[in-house]
Image (cartoon, grey):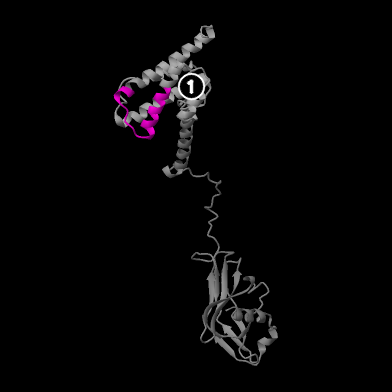
Amino acid sequence: MKKILSLIAVFTAFAISAYAGDGDRIEMEGSFLRQLQKRDSVLIGDQLQYGVLLRDVKEGTRFAFPDYQGHLTDSVETVGSWIMDTVRVSKDKNLYDIQASIVVTSFEEGKHGLQPIYLLRSEDGEKIDTLVFNPQTLEVKAPSVDPETFEVHDIRKQIGYPLTFVEILPYIGILAGIALLVLLIVYLIRRPKKDAPEPDEPAHIRALRKLDGLRGDRLWAPEKQKLFYSEVTDVLRSYIVSRYGVDAMEMTTAEILDGLKGKEVPAELYLGLKELFETSDYVKFAKMTATEEELAKAVPEAVRFVTETYQREIDKEAGNVL
């Protein structure tokens, strides 16, 4: 396809003198006049394609096209130059169907007889035939305007149409998004703080209040004993942190007991605390089931440790402890 088009392009500049060559004059059909604008009639200034369809062109055939120099007739002008397009290729026979056309226009109303289209063709490089294609007639119409009834009107205002749901849907979405954002901000401001610090109260008061909530046998069932001992010992760990500065929350039982040495904890309280923590370890880690006696004395033992160590601290500050 590229080869045949390049050959045509090379020979569009044939001298017009070659028109009178020694070849034959061949009358052809296949010319066309096609309107570029899609309407029923041709108006002043409309553009059309005026051209021919060359069928079964052999590969290597050379053509020369006429140069109209801007005017096809006195009343019909040409726009641009010839445009060629290969519309069919027969590869087995090396034959081509080629469409060649030039754009024309007219600014005068009426019927205009167009020139026949003359082409020069050379198939063997020596003999030059003249192809003459039948002419077409161009009928140009002017817009119909009655000067007696024609009125000049101002530019009309834009017609207002009622809004549809689809048109306002994006705005509804924006407003809904803003409302949700406001509600989220209000919620974040007003929601209770999960990690709010506990009231600033003495360590022994806080410990005794929590231990009081663990009294009774509601957590003595075997499947709840692990939770029971965890809560009791966690209260004591927190109290030891506040009272003695020992980082009991992160320590094992042995480390806690070792950390309390030298803190002036009475031996009786120390042994009771040791027994309580060891029982807790057995229940939590060895899956031991505590006896009812062990469960019953867990909270009182923890309360005793808190109250007596606090009282000992008060007595020490008052100078009553030797």
Quadrant in the picture for residue 3: bottom right
Quadrant in the picture for residue 283: top left
**Is 219 on the left-hand or right-hand side of 134?**
left
Q: Residue under circle 1?
A: 240
Q: Is residue 112 above or below residue 242?
A: below
Work out which quarter of the rendered image holds the N terminus and state it.
bottom right
Magenta-drawn stretch, dominant element (helix, strand or loop)? helix
The image shows residue 135 at horizontal and vertical percentages of 56, 79
Q: Is residue 163 above or below residue 190?
A: below
SS of the residue under disc 1: helix
Q: Nearer the viewer, residue 203 or 140?
A: 203
Q: Determine the residue positioned at 40% across, 24% down.
A: 275
Q: Is residue 189 visible?
A: no
Q: Determine the residue positioned at 66% across, 82% down.
A: 11
Q: Is residue 217 above or below residue 105?
A: above
Q: Is residue 287 magenta?
A: yes
Q: Determine the residue positioned at 51% across, 20% down.
A: 242
Q: Is residue 254 magenta?
A: no
The image shows residue 308 at horizontal and vertical percentages of 44, 13
Q: Amino acid at mark 1?
A: Ile
Q: Nearer the viewer, residue 189 or 180?
A: 189
Residue stretch in magenta: 273-294
Q: Nearer the viewer, residue 105 or 266?
A: 266
Quadrant in the picture for residue 167: top left
Q: Determine the residue positioned at 47% across, 23% down.
A: 238
The image shows residue 231 at horizontal and vertical percentages of 39, 26
Q: Nearer the viewer, residue 13 or 246?
A: 246
**Is 59 on the left-hand or right-hand side of 237?**
right
Q: Is residue 158 visible?
A: yes
